[in-house]
Image (spheres, grey):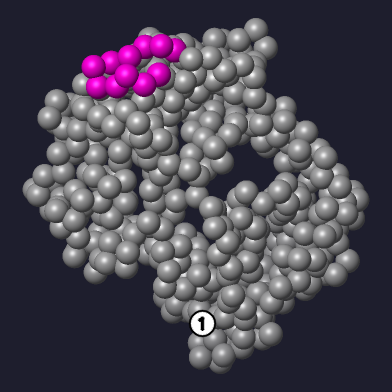
């Protein structure tokens, strides 16, 4: 994290006598790439990254709530609430919300994850005040009416059905359940048909009031933005709604913990009449705050992160056994997952699994070559920069960083951390992660004899 000057703004409001604190977290060059943060009385954090050379701006609000905050009976409530915040406020109907952004050629959407939710709008820089007003209104003034809950229930059930019709997507939910079981992190973000049908407007309203106060929120804006103007506009919107009524409240801290995933050698098969079998072979990974995550990122890239990766070369290029094969990592506050995905013909499942397991064992025992590591470092550095070439990606980076880490890291610092990974770092994390006994999740039309052999892949 790059931390520089800290200043205080002595502006007060009728609701709060406390002082808003403003910090420059990353000092850009000639104002380009400067990241600033203001914490308002009431615990609301506002972070911005300034890029004067662009003509767009992305504004988002991140909520410190995800599906892992749900009880079993509330599974799906976070995602349900994401839908409902678009359905109307005291100021705007659902049509008013969407048409306001459409009228200026903007884009507006939201997404729910296991540990956070984000609502955002991308507009021309001159239309940023409109985006701020609309998104802040949605977050602070949602009505959550009974009729809207009932209407949206149908849309969410269709979304669940759509996901289940895509086994290449659904298998990752199955893998999370295989590794984490019937726990908040192991359950699907969308919920199930039964839990969604059981949710009521009253229960969702209580969930909303508990998790959407300012202490749980981070406002992020990136692009051609002026930090002080964004702060004034956001503050006015939140004060008008009465959301900043507890001036002494402090922002909630990033999640922490030390959850251990103890599953090993577990196999889950979901029978489906599909043309392909979809498999994920994996094991516990690293928490997102673990310093070894940089080495794991390099390992993941070399093993299954591109066309030159080991898995792509061995499974697709040399043998043509799968069209899609890759590895990935998922980092949470207190644990993580490492997985290898492949989609193949059902008759090829065991061949694909054997190759993937052999490669994992080979890298765990002998590591990667220096050439593979060097190529992966270069690929990871390039993809990191290219992935931050639009204001939406920048907003995501600074918003998620504040919510999940409580700090900001400049792109140069990120590139330095990646470049500083050594071959020994990668080999050490490979031994620890890939040396574990894996678990396996499969969706497909496997026959009984094929299914009984799946345990061989994790033996």
Q: Which corner quadrant holds the C terminus? A: bottom right
- Name which quarter of the figure residue 29 lies in: top right
Tell me if residue 447 can be seen: yes
Residue labelled with disc 1: 446
**Label 1: how many residues lie within 10 Å, few (<14), some (14-19) or many (20+)?**
many
- Main structural element of the magenta stretch: helix, strand or loop? loop
Q: Out of 144 and 235, give the one closest to the viewer.
A: 235
381 on left or right of 215: right
State the image coordinates of residue 211 (x, y, percent, origin top left): 31, 46
Mark 1 residue element: loop
The magenta segment is 9-19
Q: Which corner quadrant holds the N terminus? A: top right
Q: Out of 54 and 75, give the one closest to the viewer.
A: 75
- Name which quarter of the figure residue 413 lies in: top right
Tell me if residue 165 can be seen: no
Is residue 102 shown in magenta?
no
Is residue 13 shown in magenta?
yes
State the image coordinates of residue 333 (x, y, percent, origin top left): 54, 53
- Name which quarter of the figure residue 25 lies in: top right
Residue at 61% from the left image edge and 55% from the top image edge: 287
Residue at 78% from the left image edge and 62% from the top image edge: 430
């Amino acid at each position: 994290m790059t931390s520089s000057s800290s200043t205080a703004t002595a502006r007060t409001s009728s609701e709060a006598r406390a002082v808003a604190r403003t910090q420059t977290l990353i000092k850009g060059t000639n104002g380009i790439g400067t990241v600033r943060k203001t914490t308002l009385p009431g615990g609301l954090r506002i972070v911005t990254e300034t890029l004067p050379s662009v003509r767009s701006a992305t504004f988002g609000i991140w909520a410190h709530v995800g599906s892992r905050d749900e009880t079993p009976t509330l599974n799906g409530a976070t995602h349900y609430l994401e839908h409902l915040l678009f359905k109307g406020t005291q100021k705007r109907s659902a049509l008013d919300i969407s048409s306001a952004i459409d009228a200026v050629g903007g884009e507006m959407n939201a997404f729910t994850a296991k540990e956070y939710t984000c609502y955002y709008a991308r507009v021309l820089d001159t239309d940023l005040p409109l985006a701020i007003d609309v998104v802040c209104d949605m977050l602070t003034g949602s009505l959550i009416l009974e009729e809207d809950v009932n209407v949206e229930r149908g849309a969410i059930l269709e979304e669940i059905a759509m996901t289940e019709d895509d086994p290449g997507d659904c298998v990752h939910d199955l893998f999370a359940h295989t590794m984490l079981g019937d726990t908040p992190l192991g359950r699907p973000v969308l919920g199930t048909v039964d839990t969604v049908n059981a949710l009521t407007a009253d229960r969702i309203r209580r969930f909303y009031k508990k998790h959407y106060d300012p202490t749980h929120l981070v406002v992020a804006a990136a692009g051609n933005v002026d930090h002080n103007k964004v702060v004034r506009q956001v503050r006015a919107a939140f004060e008008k709604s009465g959301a900043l009524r507890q001036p002494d409240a402090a922002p909630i801290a990033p999640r922490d913990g030390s959850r251990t995933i103890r599953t090993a050698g577990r196999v889950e098969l979901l029978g489906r009449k599909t043309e392909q079998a979809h498999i994920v072979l994996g094991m516990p990974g690293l928490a997102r705050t673990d310093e070894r995550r940089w080495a794991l990122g390099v390992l993941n890239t070399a093993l299954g992160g591109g066309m030159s990766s080991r898995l792509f070369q061995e499974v697709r290029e040399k043998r043509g056994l799968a069209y899609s094969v890759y590895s990935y990592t998922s980092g949470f506050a207190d644990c993580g997952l490492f997985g290898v995905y492949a989609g193949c013909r059902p008759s090829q499942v065991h061949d694909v699994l054997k190759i993937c397991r052999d490669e994992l064992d080979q890298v765990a025992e002998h590591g990667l070559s220096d050439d593979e590591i060097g190529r992966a470092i270069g690929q990871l550095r390039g993809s990191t920069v290219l992935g931050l070439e639009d204001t939406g990606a920048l907003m995501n980076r600074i918003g998620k960083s504040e919510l999940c880490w409580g700090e900001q890291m400049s792109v140069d610092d990120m590139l330095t951390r990646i470049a500083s990974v050594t071959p020994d770092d990668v080999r050490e994390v490979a031994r620890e992660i890939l040396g574990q006994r894996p678990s396996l999740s499969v969706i497909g039309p496997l026959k009984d004899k094929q299914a009984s052999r799946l345990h061989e892949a994790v033996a």
